[in-house]
Image (cartoon, helix red, strand yellow):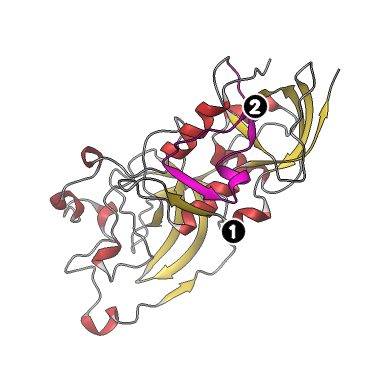
Amino acid sequence: MVRAASFTLALLLTACSAAAPSSSESPSADATAAPAASMAADPSPSPAASPSASTTSAPSVSPAAGSSARDTIWRVVVSDLVVRSEPGVADPATILPARLTTNDRVLVVNGPLVADGYEWYQVLPIRPDGLRERPFGWVAAAHREGEPWLAQEDPACPDASDLEGILRLAPEERLACYGSRTIEFRGDGGGCGAAGGLPVSYEPRWLMSESGCGFGLEIGQIDMVLRFPPAVSQDFGPSGTVEVRGHFDDPAAATCIATANYADVTPPSPDEAIAQCRTQFVVESLTNVP
């Protein structure tokens, strides 16, 4: 049975994933440079990989041929994959401090784009524990000569009415499985409320920062938060059992903005804030079951 849990914990875990990594999690300046022996680091600046001065002023970025890979799941198959804030290898300043490593899984939110001879994907790392910080940004899918650095995988998507199956998925997997289509399920909900003192706030506030009810497989555990638009009531009846209709990838996610509440916190970039908001489950209707 799906059990009610503390909503405050869910908000804290959501916001903590957006906080800046501590200094112990960030590689040193030496580690940021591309290792000579690592094929995965090839799309980082090096004498061989960097364009000449005449090309760095106007890097060429274009859509790759074929269909979009948006909302697909991929696995990293190398030990040291460079992540950048923009596609292309021309600008060393685009290299992010942290990298992805073998078996890290990601949700593609944009791409592929072609730049500097590589095919690039913007990825949101899957954080099954909700806490480990991994970099959001652009990665090259393979070496110029064809060696793969990412491998696409098919998520095991439970039936849309299987709430326990849905709750076992990471938020990014839910988006990959169900997109924006309406799904329905029944469960025991509760733990509704909001939390203050979060490191990051989002707008629209109802979609990410506050106003929701938690569902979990264990007492005291939050596996998913139901988000309620202003026009939808979150009134749970005496039994606590409800039938819920709703969807991920709400159109309001396209307007999401994240703001840090403390000076030592780095908020998600605009693209990452939108990607995180797209993983939220938005309630269309909630019916109490006697």
Q: Earlier in the sequence, mark 2 or mark 1?
A: 2
Amino acid residing under circle 1: Thr
Q: Is residue 106 visible?
A: no
For residue 158, side relative to residue 98 (left or right)? right
Q: Is residue 4 visible?
A: yes
For residue 147, side relative to residue 189 (left or right)? left
Q: Which residue is mark 1?
A: 255
Residue depicted at 22% across the width and 65% down the height: 45
Q: Relative to the observer, which residue lies in front, 105 or 26?
A: 26
Question: Percent from the top left, x then y, of residue 93?
Answer: 26, 64
Is disc 1 placed on a helix, strand or loop?
A: helix
Q: Is residue 80 magenta?
A: no
Q: Which residue is mark 2?
A: 165
Residue depicted at 52% across the width and 49% down the height: 202
Question: Rounded to the nearest whole Å, what is the CA distance between mark 2 and mark 1?
Answer: 29 Å
Furthest-right residue in this view: 290
Question: Percent from the top left, x then y, of residue 147?
Answer: 35, 55
Q: Which of labels 2 and 1 is toward the front?
A: 1
Magenta-tinted stretch: 191-218
Viewport quadrant of the N terminus: top right
Amino acid residing under circle 2: Gly
Question: Percent from the top left, x then y, of residue 21?
Answer: 30, 42
Compared with 124, 189 (above or below) is above
Callout 2 environment at 10 Å: few (<14), some (14 to 19), or many (20+)?
some
